[in-house]
Amino acid sequence: MRLISEGCPALLYLNLSYTDITNGTLRLLSRSFSNLQYLSLAHCRKFTDKGLQYLGSGKGCHKLIYLDLSGCIQISVEGFRYIAKSCSGIKHLIINDMPTLTDRCIQALVEKCQQIVSIVFLEAPHISDTAFKALAECKLVEIKIEGNNRITDLSFKLMSKFSPYIKHIYMVDCQKITDAGLKILSSMRNILVLNLADCISISDAGLKPILEGFSVSKIRELSLANCTRVTDATLMKIAQRCHGLTYLNLRYCDSLTDGGVEALGNLHSLLALNISGIPITDLKFCHGAKHLDYCDVSYCLQLTNNSIKHLAFSCHKLTSFSMAGCPKMTDVSVQYLSGVCRYLHFLDISGCVHLTDRTLRFLWKGCRQLRILKMLYCINITKPATSKHSVKLQKLEYNSDDPPPWLGYDSQGHILLTIWNSKSSQFALENTFQRLDIYGC
């Protein structure tokens, strides 16, 4: 770092993540890099609060607008106060993987850093609504938080009141977010990206006001992955009103049916779609979604070759496709894909137990731009056939092992876990568990 400071005094961008820098380097930054704007100290564990105090002692780092402190669990409230004093112009802040991060840390930071427009807290479980009260002093445009059980609907109320221009809301796996909170969001006018994946308490009732609200025509990306209470009624609303939607994630929304998914054919703007793990039997929506570039139908156990035929002939511009864990697929499905989808760069056919070496011949002939191929648990595809053409690929994942039980079917493609087809059985099973420990994963 001393050599860099001597040779590159005009440096704007510096990424020191996962290095063994100490307080000495932070002192060097404050003395030498007066123009530095981007700094990443992610997962650097050998500097202390004292090092952060050095940042304000020289001419450097006062122009910093981007700071990444992910994984720096040694920083205390005092350390954040030093950052605020030295780098008050920060606009973009990332603090992921911080189990030690508390509301007091954010309060100390925001006392002087009030130009923040983008803040990211992934895996910061102790942050609560109190932090959002402090952030009300900032004009937030983007907020990301994941894996939190303390954030409630109050945070949405604070966003609506103090951050009316927010565009990107990423609230993933926040268990206390409910339909009441979503109704508050319906008054916001500028939402472009809304990610509510794994917020398992939300349902059609909460999404309806948003899909009838001021932002509905502006939403470009929407993720409702694992929101199991969402039904076809929400899909109908999405199809009718989200005319600018380009990305939609419905992974494991297992209350959806063929009828709801078919309505998505009205979304002519759609470029990327994830419907993996949904109990559908066909892909008729593809006739209207002709511009799809990315599609994931993995673990849709009932899909057949005819479904892939619909997809291939309607969405011939696909560059990325996954049908992993679809036990009914045969070589014919790949023949359809390779015959029409000539732009495929990525393909995942893992767990398709009926595919044979013919599949590879179809791919090598038709998909000449294929770069990444995943073929795990393809028991009827041989190693010699795989090795013959693997040099054409940038990345290949292959084995011929029997499919593991968690895929839900055996080596013949026979479904094992039929209990999940019954909601009453699922409810009964869930209420049987008193304790579940999974060690060593």
Image: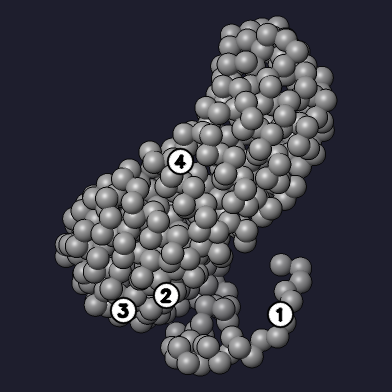
Mark 2, secondary structure of its residue: loop
Q: Residues within 10 Å of mark 2 (few under 14, many from 20)?
A: some
The picture places residue 120, in percent across and down from the top left corner, at 56, 42
Q: Which residue is mark 2?
A: 229
- Quadrant position of residue 184: bottom left
Dots 4, 1 in contact, CB < 8 A: no
Instruction: Pick the residue in front: 425 or 204.
Output: 204
Mark 1, secondary structure of its residue: loop
Tell which circle, 4 or 2, labels the residue nearer the N-terminal end. 4
Q: Which circle marks residue 162 in the picture?
A: 4
Q: Residues within 10 Å of mark 4 (few under 14, many from 20)?
A: some
Whether residue 434 sits left or right of residue 154 in the image: it is: right
Q: Which residue is mark 3?
A: 257
Q: Comparing marks 4 and 1, which lies closer to the viewer? A: 4
Tell which circle, 4 or 1, labels the residue nearer the N-terminal end. 4
Q: Which residue is mark 1?
A: 436
Estimate the spatial distance between the alpha carbons at disc 3 and disc 2, rounded to whole Å: 13 Å
Q: Comparing marks 3 and 2, which lies closer to the viewer? A: 2
Estimate the spatial distance between the alpha carbons at disc 4 and disc 1, rounded to whole Å: 42 Å
Estimate the spatial distance between the alpha carbons at disc 4 and disc 3, rounded to whole Å: 39 Å
Instruction: Pick the residue in front: 342 or 143.
Output: 143
Identify which amino acid the numbered label 3 is placed on: Thr
The picture places residue 401, in percent across and down from the top left corner, at 57, 74
Q: Residue at point 31% right, 79% down?
A: 257
Q: Residues within 10 Å of mark 1 (few under 14, many from 20)?
A: few
